[in-house]
Amino acid sequence: MQIDLAKRLNVYDTAKFKGYSDDDIAHAFWLNPTWAKAFFLHGKNIGSDAYGTNIEKYLNRIHGKKGKKS
């Protein structure tokens, strides 16, 4: 479902070109589609959840990396 949304929003091809996997795209869109679109298309972290986790930090946690401190 998230991959279909990424394709409808014209984000999927750009994210894949930048080296993100289908899982990365799906996880980001699960967190928040608006934030994911801004992250993949423009490299911007425009929002975060109640714990301060934005798309970049979320993907870093999935991959076992420490996120940047804001």
Image (tube, rainbow, N blue to C red):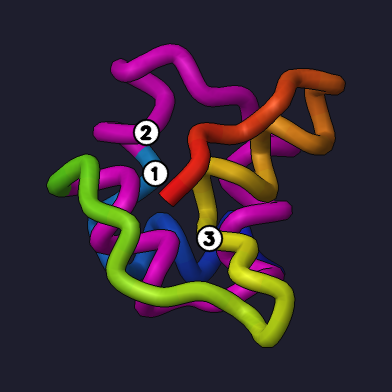
- Give the alpha-carbon distance from disc 1 to disc 3, as whole Å: 19 Å
- Give the alpha-carbon distance from disc 1 to disc 2, as whole Å: 5 Å
When the figure is inspected, residue 25 is found, relative to residue 45, above or below; the finding is: above
Image quadrant holding the N terminus, namely: bottom right
Q: Amino acid at mark 1?
A: Tyr
Among the two numbered marks 2 and 3 on one chain, the one whose residue lies closer to the N terminus: 2
Q: Which mark is residue 12?
A: 1
- Secondary structure, mark 2, is helix
At a point 53% along the width and 54% down the height, the residue shown is: 55
Q: Which residue is denoted by mark 3 in the rendering?
A: 54
- Secondary structure, mark 3, is loop
Circles 1 and 2 in contact, beta carbons < 8 Å? yes
In the rendered image, residue 17, in percent from the top left (x then y), is placed at: 31, 17
Mark 1 or mark 2, whichever is nearer to me: 2
**Part of the protein shown in magenta:** 13-41
- Give the alpha-carbon distance from disc 2 to disc 3, as whole Å: 17 Å
Outermost residue on the bottom side: it is: 50
In the rendered image, residue 25, in percent from the top left (x then y), is placed at: 58, 45
At a point 72% along the width and 75% down the height, the residue shown is: 51
Outermost residue on the left side: it is: 42
Mark 1 or mark 3, whichever is nearer to me: 3
Q: Amino acid at mark 2?
A: Ala
Q: Amino acid at mark 3?
A: Asn
